[in-house]
């Protein structure tokens, strides 16, 4: 995507974020006269500490894979709003579609006066989702809301209460979704008890010696000890763990889950909130396995930065709820629907599915080079599907002990040099990449140069 901003030359060893030599018009405008420090002080008085932010900077302007803060510092964005910006910041098609919709109406509530963009997007999602059976789509506002509705639909369709999730899975921060989320800190700490009839099965882990066979055996043992299969409505799984470490589900396991669900009349829910809309090189990550789920939850990059989520599923399952049983005041907001249709069109027209595959191959190769050169025997694993890639740091290869402290230092050094990164994983020792698929090769290389300098700096700091 063309940029109006002149790109900076690569400065891998820069001591602080670069200030662009050609400043975007919005940075010259008097949008905010406050500094990062002033906004931090205001935030401390106005916002609860539970709403944490990864970086102590405040956004002023963003374009594609670049962001400027209120102090004028430029950053390369490898976070993308936590996987929301596969089509980049302010994609022209997305912005134009949203503005055009705003000129007509911004809200009526689909439950009161419905509108065409909701139907058009539902039709598009039904066509994109895997499987030959007729499908229907519910639109809501957040990923957690989508997951809650998927569970509600599965329970109505089966007449059963139980839900099985997996170790390391992340499904949201509401109380029901926290019951399914398999990570205590910071999400579940001090806020239980959680809803009943939610069970957890093991996820394959080479580090812990848990094979696919072990995980499936654990699930079957769960049927014998705690979760009577005739009372289980759904098994929910992320085809690639998000917060849990960007670990893809082995295809063999996904096929066995499909067989188990078919055997016991259980709904298989694919949580594609983070992995969907091209992040892995397919519209939905589960497509890599060839398995068709009964329900799919979607959000994040579907609408190119606008708040929108949904549940796509078999028509007979989606129709299980009585009229009025599904919906919400803001669900399927017309502006967000218009943005989503434009974002999907951009993914199609710009070949971003193939771009994701190519980008993923390049990232993995470059990370391997960087690890060998800048932190030997510290970068234990490089994994992912398409451009949904993670790099995991350990203390050494002999013990493969997760090193969350080293990971934090890498991220901190990257921020000082002008690169936005986020960690993930049960031990917080993996760096995940969510750079927009529209990012230029030059921007990606610049970001990788900063990443290498940051890894080297973290290693040198440790050696002192």
Image (cartoon, rainbow, N blue to C red):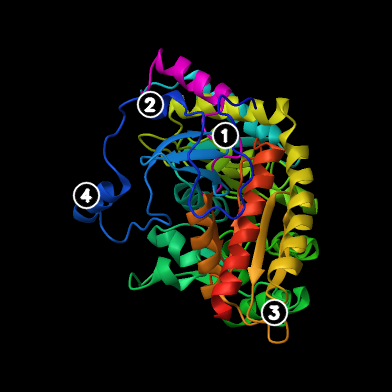
Marks 4 and 2, how far apart at CA: 23 Å
- Give the residue at mark 4: 42
Q: Is residue 302 magenta?
A: no
Expressed as whole percent of the image width and height from the top left, the position of residue 344 reads 63, 30
Identify residue for label 1: 64
Q: Which is closer to the viewer, label 3 or label 4?
A: 4
Mark 1 or mark 4: whose residue is earlier in sequence? 4
**Which of the two discs, 1 and 2, labels the residue nearer the N terminus?**
2
- Residue 42 locus on image (x, y percent): 21, 49
Q: Label 2 crowding class (10 Å Cα cut-off): few <14, some 14-19, many 20+?
A: few
Q: CA separation, marks 3 and 4?
A: 43 Å
Task: Give the left or right position of residue 169, taking residue 112 as reference.
Answer: right
Q: Residues within 10 Å of mark 4 (few under 14, many from 20)?
A: few
Crowding at mark 3 (Cα within 10 Å: few <14, some 14-19, many 20+): few
Circle 2 sits on which residue? 28
Q: Nearer the viewer, mark 3 or mark 2?
A: 2
In the depicted view, which residue is nearer to us: 402 or 279? Answer: 402
Give the residue furthest to the bottom. Answer: 399
Question: Earlier along the polypeptide chain: callout 4 or callout 2?
Answer: 2
**SS class, disc 2:** helix
The quarter in which the N terminus is drawn is top right
Corner quadrant of residue 70: top left
Q: Which residue is mark 3?
A: 207
Q: CA distance from mark 1 to mark 4?
A: 29 Å
Q: Are marks 1 and 4 in contact (CB under 8 Å)?
A: no
């Amino acid at each position: 995507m063309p940029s109006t901003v002149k790109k900076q030359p690569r400065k891998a060893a820069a001591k602080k974020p670069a200030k662009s030599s050609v400043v975007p018009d919005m940075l010259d405008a008097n949008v905010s006269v406050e500094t990062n420090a002033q906004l931090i002080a205001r935030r401390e008085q106005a916002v609860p500490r539970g709403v944490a932010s990864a970086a102590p900077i405040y956004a002023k302007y963003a374009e594609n894979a670049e962001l400027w803060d209120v102090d004028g510092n430029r950053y390369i964005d490898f976070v993308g709003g936590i996987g929301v910006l596969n089509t980049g910041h302010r994609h022209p098609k997305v912005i134009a579609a949203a503005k055009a919709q705003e000129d007509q109406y911004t809200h009526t509530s689909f439950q009161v006066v419905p509108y065409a963009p909701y139907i058009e997007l539902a039709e598009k999602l039904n066509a994109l989702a895997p499987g030959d059976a007729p499908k229907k789509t519910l639109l809501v506002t957040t990923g957690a809301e989508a997951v809650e509705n998927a569970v509600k639909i599965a329970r109505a369709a089966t007449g059963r209460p139980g839900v099985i999730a997996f170790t390391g899975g992340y499904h949201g921060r509401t109380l029901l979704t926290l019951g399914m989320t398999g990570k205590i800190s910071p999400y579940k700490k001090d806020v239980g008890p959680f809803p009943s009839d939610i069970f957890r099965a093991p996820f394959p882990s080479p580090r812990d010696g848990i094979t696919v066979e072990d995980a499936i055996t654990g699930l079957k043992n769960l049927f014998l000890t705690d979760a009577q299969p005739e009372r289980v409505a759904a098994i929910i799984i992320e085809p690639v763990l998000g917060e849990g470490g960007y670990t893809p589900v082995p295809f063999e396991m996904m096929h066995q889950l499909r067989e188990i669900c078919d055997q016991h009349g259980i709904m298989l829910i694919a949580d594609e909130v983070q992995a969907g809309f091209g992040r892995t090189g397919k519209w939905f990550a589960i497509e890599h396995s060839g398995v068709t789920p009964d329900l799919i939850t979607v959000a994040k990059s579907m609408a190119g930065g606008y708040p929108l989520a949904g549940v796509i599923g078999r028509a007979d399952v989606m129709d299980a709820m009585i009229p009025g049983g599904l919906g919400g005041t803001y669900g399927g907001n017309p502006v967000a629907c218009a943005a989503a249709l434009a974002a999907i069109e951009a993914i199609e027209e710009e070949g971003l599915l193939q771009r994701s595959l190519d980008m993923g191959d390049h990232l993995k190769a470059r990370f391997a080079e960087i690890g060998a050169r800048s932190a030997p025997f510290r970068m234990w694993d490089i994994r992912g599907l398409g451009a949904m890639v993670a790099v995991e740091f350990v203390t050494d290869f002999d013990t493969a002990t997760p090193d969350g402290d080293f990971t934090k230092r890498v991220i901190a050094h990257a921020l000082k040099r002008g690169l936005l990164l986020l960690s993930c994983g049960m031990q917080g020792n993996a760096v995940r990449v969510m750079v927009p698929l529209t990012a230029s090769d030059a921007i990606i290389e610049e970001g990788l140069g900063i990443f290498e300098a940051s890894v080297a700096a973290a290693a040198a700091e440790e050696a002192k």
